[in-house]
Image (cartoon, helix red, strand yellow):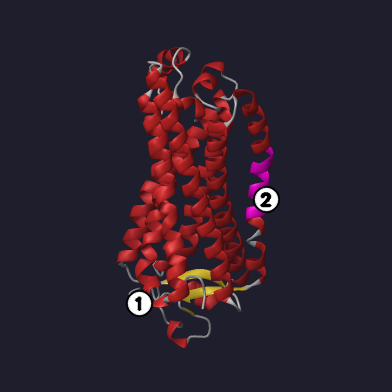
Amino acid sequence: MSVYGHIPIDNKTEYSNFTYSFNVWTVFAAVTCTYTLFSFWITLKMCIFYLNNKNNEEVKRGLRLDVFRLFLLMQVWKEFHVLMDFLIVRIPLTSLFTSYCYQSKPVLLLKILSLMFTGVVYTSHSLTLAFCIQRVALLYAHEYHKDKIAKIFDIVNPLIIFVGHGFGIPFFFASSSCYQMDEPFPFGAIVITALRRDMKTYTIIYSIFSNTNITLTIILTIMMFVKLYHKRKITSELRRPVDLKSEKVLTATMILILLPVVVPSILSIANLFSSNLYAYMFLLRCIALDVRAHIVSCYFYYTHYIFKKKNRSTKIRNDSTIRTVSTYF
């Protein structure tokens, strides 16, 4: 059994004369592609903003560039995750490439896709955890330690990307194929994945990885909220003004990052104990990926004042006298 899919279509004669017909999964792929392109553009705009303003002192006073840099890496790899999901799952589910996969058997292409998909998944999850660790470390650190933390993560981030994609290498050497999805998916709805001799072992390994990732993310999020509560309480007692809007952006962003991560873990556990439930829960993972990638990027871009030219100068001048939570974002 594969991670996604039910049975390989190799050597299944019923697929020899298969022809594509318009279906609801084509509509699903088209709709999700539409808002995905918009989210890609927003993420690209933030990357361009960073490249154009990384030496801008005005921007530095309103946004920690080391945190913003890791945030962008996290979101870029989440967007890559969604892109690979289209190539591996959503487009194949439409049955557009079912006949091609059966007739041509593009083994090398399938291996490359499995390699890239697995590497992107592990890297995306790892960068999310690294982002949470960095945020909490900066919140709890003394001011003179923050530059050291920034330097550490500048070294760690490339290592995470390198090691994360290294996890995909075994899938290049495994047998990859197109798999027919089980009910309620129609005949011809396939996904691309690697077949491993001991898929249950892989499922256990991925479940441990994802659940550990989720547990640590939840713990770090709680630590962040506790620290913010204490800072807010102290600020209130000293009767200092506080920027509640920036704090809301920080809190909402963390919640949006955290909630969708739970779904892949539930799916991996469901697959481990009851594979019959997996097909019915499968589309939830697509929605979870979209929420984690698209809503987080769009929410941050449209709510953080640093991207609003008209308000940026006034806001940053106010921040020179008001200690705000945005200092940590």
Residue 290 position in % (x across, y down)? 40, 51
| Residue occupying image coordinates x 45% and y 64% | 89
Viewer-closest of 143 and 116 = 143
Q: Earlier in the sequence, mark 2 or mark 1?
A: 2
Q: Callout 2 environment at 10 Å: few (<14), some (14 to 19), or many (20+)? A: few
Read off the magenta span: 155-164
Q: Callout 1 environment at 10 Å: few (<14), some (14 to 19), or many (20+)? A: few
Residue 4 in view here: yes
Residue 324, compared with residue 32, is above or below; it is above
- Which residue is tagged 2? 162
Residue 178 position in % (x across, y down)? 51, 73
Viewer-closest of 137 and 49 = 137
| Residue occupying image coordinates x 56% and y 41% | 133
- SS for callout 1: loop
Viewer-closest of 231 and 132 = 231
Viewer-closest of 262 and 306 = 262
